[in-house]
Amino acid sequence: MDQRSLKVLEYHKILKSLMENCVTQGGKEQAQALLPLETLTAVNRALDLTNESLGMILRNGRPPLADVPNTSDYVKRAAIGSMLSMKELLSIATLLRIAGDMDNYYHNDTQMDTLVLLKDLFESLESCEELEKEISRKILGPEEIADTASRELSRIRREMQFKYNRISEKLNHMISSTAYEKYLQEKIVTIRNSRYVVPVKQEYRSQVPGIVLDKSASGATLYIEPLAVVELNNDIKILVAEEEQEIIRILKDLTQKVADSREDIIGNYDLLVDLDFQFAKAKLGLAIDGVRTEITEAGPVALLRAKHPLIPNDRVVASDIYFEESIDTMVITGPNTGGKTVSLKTIGLLNLMVQSGLFVPVREGSKTRIFRDIFADIGDEQSIEQSLSTFSSHMTNIVTIMDQADANSLVLFDELGAGTDPTEGAALAISILDALHKRGVTSVSTTHYSELKEYALVTPGVINASVEFDVKTLRPTYRLLIGVPGKSNAFEIAKRLGLSDEIIENSKLLIKNEAIRFEETLIKIDEKRRRTEAEHDAMIRLKRETEEMKHQMDQEKERFEEEKKALIAKAQEEALEIVRKTRAETEEIYREIRTIQETTTSAIRDNKELEAIRKRIKEKEKNIYQFGNLPRDYQGEALRMEDLSVGMKVFVVSLRKEGEVINLLPNEDKAMVQSGIMKLKVDVKDLAPSKALAKPEEKRVTFKKTDRHAMNTKLDLRGKNGEESLFLVEKMIGDAILTGNTQLVIVHGKGTGKLRQIIHEYLKGNPLIADFRLGAMNEGGSGVTIVNL
């Protein structure tokens, strides 16, 4: 890329913003060196990395990166045998800890499977967790090593502390003694030459036995090491030397471990710097509301709702910047301060950013193409040093551009042909644009010359554009209008500023009629454009109001549906409550039956009461079957008589139970259904296909039935105890199930009634028993129980 063009398009300011989003020094250096890529594969890879990084930030927050020191030099020194300092080892531990944090950040991502390029970076990290923990445990600071770094160091420091305590005791005793009070200059213990001493007055030197290690500047004070602590100070000196040797040994050991992991450590630094750079691109995209822009090798350019990324969001105006496939040259016209240069820079800078793998502030669906070179001639290029005028300086740059630009280039000209005679300048500008157009070079130029507007109108592949200007407020709107040439508005602006009408009219007379007609045509075009935009805005508003009304109607419909469901649910709940009460009453009736069977002494009265209760049961059952629309455990299509067959599995809706058809009653439109131990006569409309039909076939255990007459259905328990009787009753019931017998007779005798009570308690709790009763007078009376399975 042309370095001068990068500068005038302010690409360096984008890099500065990118650097500010980097955390590591290495990442900042990588951002500062970033240049636009020139191949489609490289650009798409860079955009993919930015996209994956942005996704991770949105899902998991910002990554746990910190400024990692470049430890590569430390590691290389360790590899050749140099011992690393505590500070250098701590730097390596910091690097490894951040690598571990980033590894956790990656593995905690709920959508890590969607990552492709970042996955390669993250999975290449080697946390070296054991080495990081060992360094952090043994080294507490740049100049401090832990007592627990080794057993030997711990021993040495314990002994040193013991010696210090002994010295402290002796010297404190000495300075607090009245015998030495007049000999001491001060009652303090101090250190000279790493040994503990006391300050003694010079005239009492002979009164304090010991070694003089120092004296004050005046000579009045001598610092004497008393003989009582000389030996202890010697011991401490030896221990200090041992401590230094042990610390050196520990540091050498850690240095060797660093050397053993040198490739992982150096690799981690490079990976963390690269990750920092990628996440900085994502953070910059978030800051400028950037989105990913589609890019092709040689397709059209369509930057929709494009904004200049360096203008504050509350001041920048979005514009649609696009080239149709047949267009390669755009001429932007309009008054000064109208934003033409901003539009020009926006086109160039956004393309540079996209080719650098950055997201740009445009609307979703925008696209652009790869440009091998982007040339820009923008701004005042007057050069005093080279004795060049503005025109000459611009022309020198244009000559260079014309020599290098080809079909893979984007060329941006600001005020092409300005700085010289307008007639010659306009002719020169047209020739330059026409030469680029014939080469297939994509170019965008700003100008004031009406001749360039006419050239764009009559030349295929060339299009006019303008920056909108509000004459009433004398302010630009900065909106770029593609396909509409701009007016200079010089007369309107002068009139609004107070220039007399006479001067303005005289000015118009000096202009050729053709130029006046052209300007009038532009006015009409602009008025038509404004009307069209107003109509378009009205249609948009109408569409929005229609959609809002539809949305409100949909909400009302949804509310009605919810109310309908709520009412149905309430009705169904009430129906279920009725069914529950009815069943409870039915159960009470059955309990009355059992009570009568157990207590009655008159067979005739028994039969009459039972008949009355049976009628009540039938009435209750009718009430239950009336609720055919109750909530079902299984919602299936209702069956008809012709759908049924004997042996068919069905679902009884009102009872919410499975059953099997054992007989059909077409005349009554009913069917006999066996459900468990119950045989029911059910309306056909109360039947639905069995749920079991939709389930996988279950394995069933089958039993070979024996002849129902092969067993004795009468069991005599008289003379047997309760435990033996229950065993025989249970065995009899099991045999009856296997043989298909449904009625049993148990003879327990009258006696005290104790055996009868035990048998009845057992039968009540057995789910295989449908009902049981005492025998009638002709069946044995209260000494016999009749059981129905």
Image: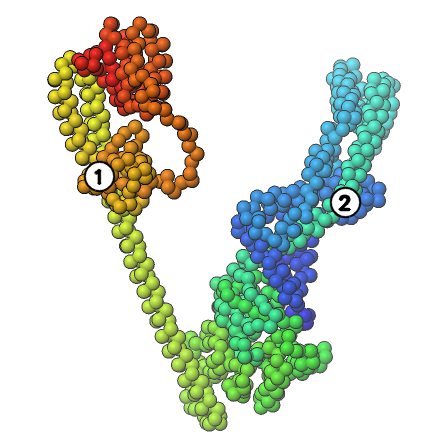
- State the image coordinates of residue 569 (x, y, percent, origin top left): 26, 42
Side of 119 where 695 appears, left or right: left
Residue 181 against residue 477 in the figure, above or below: above
Instruction: Calculate the distance from the C-alpha at mark 2 to the C-alpha at mark 1.
Output: 91 Å
Question: Residue at (68%, 72%) from the top-left corner?
Answer: 2
Identify the residue under disc 2. Answer: 262
Secondary structure of the residue carrying tag 1 is: strand
- State the image coordinates of residue 294 (x, y, percent, origin top left): 56, 65
Question: Residue at (69%, 80%) from the top-left corner?
Answer: 403
Question: Residue at (78%, 22%) from the top-left corner?
Answer: 159
Identify the residue under disc 1. Answer: 665
Q: Quadrant of residue 459?
A: bottom right
| N-term-proximal mark, 2 vs 1 | 2
Residue 155 against residue 435 in the figure, above or below: above
Side of 118 where 484 appears, left or right: left
Asked if residue 208 shows in the view, the reply is no
Q: Are marks 2 and 1 in contact (CB under 8 Å)?
A: no
Q: Quadrant of residue 136?
A: top right
Asked if residue 170 shows in the view, the reply is yes
Side of 515 where 44 appears, left or right: right
Q: Nearer the viewer, residue 649 or 427?
A: 649
Side of 188 where 682 appears, left or right: left
What amino acid is at disc 2? Arg
